[in-house]
Amino acid sequence: MTETLTAPRGRPREYDEAAVTTALMEQFWAHGYDGTSLADIMRVTGLGKASLYAGFGNKQAMYLRALGLYEAREVDGGVAMLGNADIPPDARLRALMHAPADTQEQTTDRRGCFLCNASADRASLDRPTADAVRAGYAKLRAALVALMGELGHGREAAERLGALALTTYSGMRVMARAGVDVAVLRASADAVLDAALPKG
Amino acid sequence: MTETLTAPRGRPREYDEAAVTTALMEQFWAHGYDGTSLADIMRVTGLGKASLYAGFGNKQAMYLRALGLYEAREVDGGVAMLGNADIPPDARLRALMHAPADTQEQTTDRRGCFLCNASADRASLDRPTADAVRAGYAKLRAALVALMGELGHGREAAERLGALALTTYSGMRVMARAGVDVAVLRASADAVLDAALPKG
DNA sequence: GAAGTTGTGGTCCGCTCGGTCCGCATATGC
DNA sequence: GCATATGCGGACCGAGCGGACCACAACTTC
């Protein structure tokens, strides 16, 4: 259908769309929607306003793009890890549940989870964002429910424990932003592992 | 120390500070920090800018006041409920854990938990807000740990389960803002109750 | 009543916001 | 070379922002 072999007429764009989208993701992830101005966006992308608006629409669309890339990279990456048969099932669950506390302890990264941030501060104002957030959550939940099944839980228990793991993860990410004591995050994670892993 | 008996000199203020603070809380709770302008604040309080700045400082201070009132009312109210000896301990835990799903299902209230919202969108930018959020979380956690003790758990298990309940609550509130399916919220809450209540 | 003190409504300010527009640069197709 | 098409940097826009200021109103004190 689309003719990709013939070069497009007119001046070719000078920027790498993937690189720009990555920069958008980093910026919105770290500083949120209201916390980033168009000036910030121009700075981190190196593009002028005209190029940004021609290529990405408005600020909301840029945010949605950034969130989409996060889902494709981080969320899908997490889902892949949760389903990785090369790792024992319990280790996969441990890895996810300990991640927030480890990040809090070992790095200065306080960006949290872009999906969770979007859910808290943008989803209630913007329908497409809410849809994207729900889709991301649904993917993670499905992977967690499947993992709980691998761990030997029946359907109903797996549903509950999968939801619990997702909700706890989300809560940890949000609480971490306020600097809640790492011990509290670890205690929460351990409680989920107690509930999900045989004999605990 | 302070002379409260003699009437203060000068023109007496015409507004009720408590009522204004309540209006501030409602506004910031519903629309967040960046989502409310000074014009909004003037509208909901009925005050002019000069009165607001003279009485409350700047916008950030107004937000902090609003959050303080939320803690005094909602958080302390929740803590009191969790420690209310007139209600069976398991019913108290159930009440808290089911609250997010019930609110989602039975009302159009999508404000969520002001404390959780503040944690997600403001705490990482504003030290005093982060301190207030942590203090609120700590109060809730202490009440939940005590409740877990009442339910017969040992010290260590009570710590874990208390943290789990708090984190799950926080996560549910955040996920609810994106309109996540109520069934997921209920499943998470039930999983916590399974873990915390004897025989489940 | 005069003087002093404080609250109030309204106005004004400088700045930043998201978004648009225009003139020029850089490409292709003829 | 010329017409055409597209990307680009930067100037520009109206609106709204948080905040400061001021003249007047409403009090107490003397």
Image (cartoon, coloured by chain):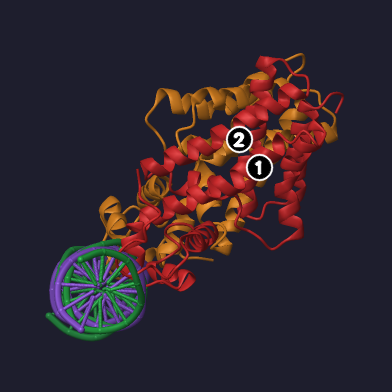
Chain colours: A orange, B red, C purple, D green
Q: Is residue A68 visible?
A: no
Question: Which residue, given by chain and number where applicable, does mark 2 sit on?
Answer: B140
Q: Quadrant of the N terminus of chain A?
A: bottom right
Q: Quadrant of the C terminus of chain A?
A: top right
Residue C19 x %, y %: 36, 73
Secondary structure under badge 2?
Answer: helix
Picture residue at 53% right of the left edge, 57% below the top: B29
Q: Are marks 1 and 2 on the same chain?
A: yes
The chain containing the residue under callout 2 comes to B
Query: Label 1: how many residues lie within 10 Å, few (<14), some (14-19) or many (20+)?
Result: some
Residue A40 x %, y %: 29, 55
Horizontally, residue A191 falls left or right of residue D24, namely right
Q: Are marks 1 and 2 in contact (CB under 8 Å)?
A: yes
The chain containing the residue under callout 1 comes to B
Horizontally, residue B90 falls left or right of residue B107, namely right
Residue A128 quadrant: bottom right
Task: Report the amino acid beneath label 1.
Answer: Gly
- The residue closer to the viewer here, A51 or A32, is A32
Residue B148 x %, y %: 72, 25
| In the depicted structure, whether residue B48 falls above or below residue A107 | below
| Cα gap from disc 1 to disc 2, whole angstroms | 8 Å
Picture residue at 38% right of the left edge, 51% below the top: A24
Query: Label 2: how many residues lie within 10 Å, few (<14), some (14-19) or many (20+)?
Result: many
Picture residue at 84% right of the left edge, 24% below the top: B198
Question: Which residue, given by chain and number where applicable, does mark 1 sit on?
Answer: B78
Residue A192 quadrant: top right
Horizontally, residue A27 falls left or right of residue A147, namely left
Residue B63 x %, y %: 43, 54
